[in-house]
Image (spheres, rainbow, N blue to C red):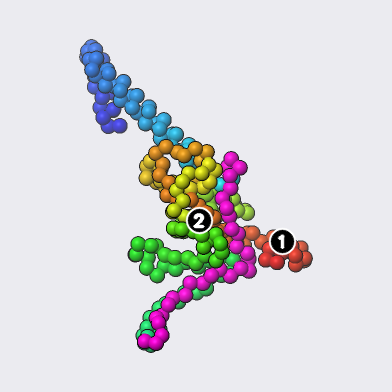
Amino acid sequence: MIRLTFLFSLLYVDAALGFVPAPALRACRQARQATATCGSRSTQMVAQMEQTGLHGTGSRFLPIVQIGAREHYPRTVCIAGAYPGLTAEDIAAPTSGEPAEQGTWQYDFTDPEGPQMGTVALPGGDTVTDLIDPVIIVAASDSLGISLPQDATTEVLAVVDRAEVDFQEGKFFVWQAPDKSVIIRWFKQEPQGYQCLGRVVFVHVPFLDVMKKPSSGFEEEMDDF
């Protein structure tokens, strides 16, 4: 931008003095203008591409697992050691966190400075067992296009299998964009210049107070029946 401003300033000075810009200078100006226009269009295309492919667009939906109001999520418990051979200090050393409230999960940030930010326990099942190289991405619900009652937003768990990088139309994948940012989107065709980092297998959504339905007096109509 500074170089372009300087170039245009030279042209204005030349015109004021009665000089005609040299062909090389004119060609340079045209080349710079073309480059700037091309770069602007490229940036707009990337931005437009990243705004599409959200949950609920194009009749494509993330596999969402909704936690029940009275559901107990698995609790992560530290291991003190192996018996026989452990000491009283070994038993006292691990720290234990509070259990998760019903309808939500519990994080474990035992070593936040380590290579992994933390851990969270997932309920067992065939889908979880079949994951080859799983990681969790903690995401804001609205960043994925997930709408909640009363326009609420909350943290959700996106379960990603890093072993699944073969493109599938309409499936949600984690992508590294050309500008090195990371997005979660679905595409009709594999986007050029994007690196696939894994497939979103499902998304866990916690139970929120705004999800409660007004009581009708009938137990079978309650959220946690």
The magenta segment is: 57-85
Horizontal and vertical percent position of residue 168: 51, 44
Left or right of 34: which side holds 9? left
Name the quarter where the C terminus is drawn: bottom right
Task: Tell us which disc is closer to us: 2 or 1.
Answer: 2
- For the point 27% across and 18% down, the residue is 27
Q: Which quarter of the figure has residue 178?
A: top left
Numbered label attached to residue 85: none
Secondary structure state at the residue bearing disc 2: strand
- For the point 40% across and 44% down, the residue is 195
Asked if one can make out residue 9 in the rendered structure from this viewpoint, the answer is no
Dot 2 corresponds to which residue?
Answer: 158
Comparing 147 with 5, the one in front is 147
- For the point 37% across and 65% down, the residue is 112
Dot 1 corresponds to which residue?
Answer: 214
Q: Total label count?
A: 2
Q: Work out how far the residue at label 2 is from the one at label 1, CA to CA, in angstroms.
A: 30 Å
Q: Which quarter of the figure has residue 25?
A: top left
Question: What kind of residue is marked 2?
Answer: Ala
Q: Residues within 10 Å of mark 1 (few under 14, many from 20)?
A: few
Question: What kind of residue is marked 1?
Answer: Pro
Left or right of 15: which side holds 168? right
Which tag, 2 or 1, sits closer to the chain's start?
2
Horizontal and vertical percent position of residue 213: 69, 60
Q: Residues within 10 Å of mark 2 (few under 14, many from 20)?
A: many
Tell whether position 161 is magenta.
Answer: no
